[in-house]
Image: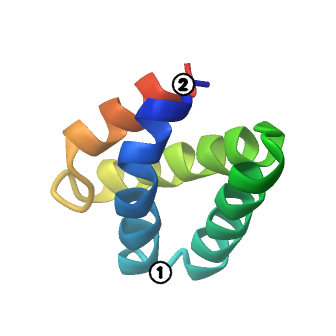
Amino acid sequence: MDAVKIEKVVAEVIGKLEKIKETELASELSWCWVSFQNDGNPVGVIEKGTLALAAFKEAREKNSKAVAKKLVDDLEKALA
């Protein structure tokens, strides 16, 4: 996981999760992000980020305009 890249994209990811009605996942990712900032352990961010990526891909299958391809690409790069 690239901490600099994830920091740039995490707020947008959380906002988009809320827009596509994945509010529980959004709050979990938000909590994991704050936890990561405090303890430096990326396990939760990676896990919830991967779930967010799956949710985005599913939303794009239903409606390609639901989630921007750039956001999906940026999240993939940040998690890699």
Which disc, if any, is residue 52? Answer: none
Q: Closer to the observer: label 2 or label 1?
A: 2
The extreme top residue here reads: 80
Q: Which residue appears at 24% of the width and 62% of the height?
A: 66
Cα separation, mark 2 vs mark 1, equals 27 Å
Residue 57: tell me if it is visible.
no
Question: Residue 73's quadrant in the figure?
Answer: top left
Q: How many marks?
A: 2
Residue 71: quarter of image: top left
Secondary element at tag 1: loop
As shown in the figure, which amino acid type bears the numbered disc 2?
Asp
Looking at marks 2 and 1 on the same chain, the residue that comes earlier in the sequence is marked by: 2
Residue at the image point whose x is 68% and y is 52% from the top: 37
Q: Position of residue 56 (x, y in %)?
A: 42, 51
Q: Is residue 31 visible?
A: yes
Asked whether 3 or 68 is in front, the reply is 3
Q: Which residue is mark 2?
A: 2
Question: Callout 2: few (<14), some (14-19), or many (20+) C-alpha neighbours within 10 Å?
Answer: few
Residue denoted by label 1: 21
Q: Quadrant of the N terminus?
A: top right
- At x 83% / y 39%, what residue is drawn? 41
Give the residue type at disc 1. Lys
In which quadrant of the rendered image does the C terminus lie? top right
> Vertical placement of 6 versus 12: above or below?
above
Q: Is 78 displayed left or right of 74 in the figure?
A: right
Q: Residue at x 36, y 78 (%)?
A: 19
| Left or right of 77 in this view: 39 | right
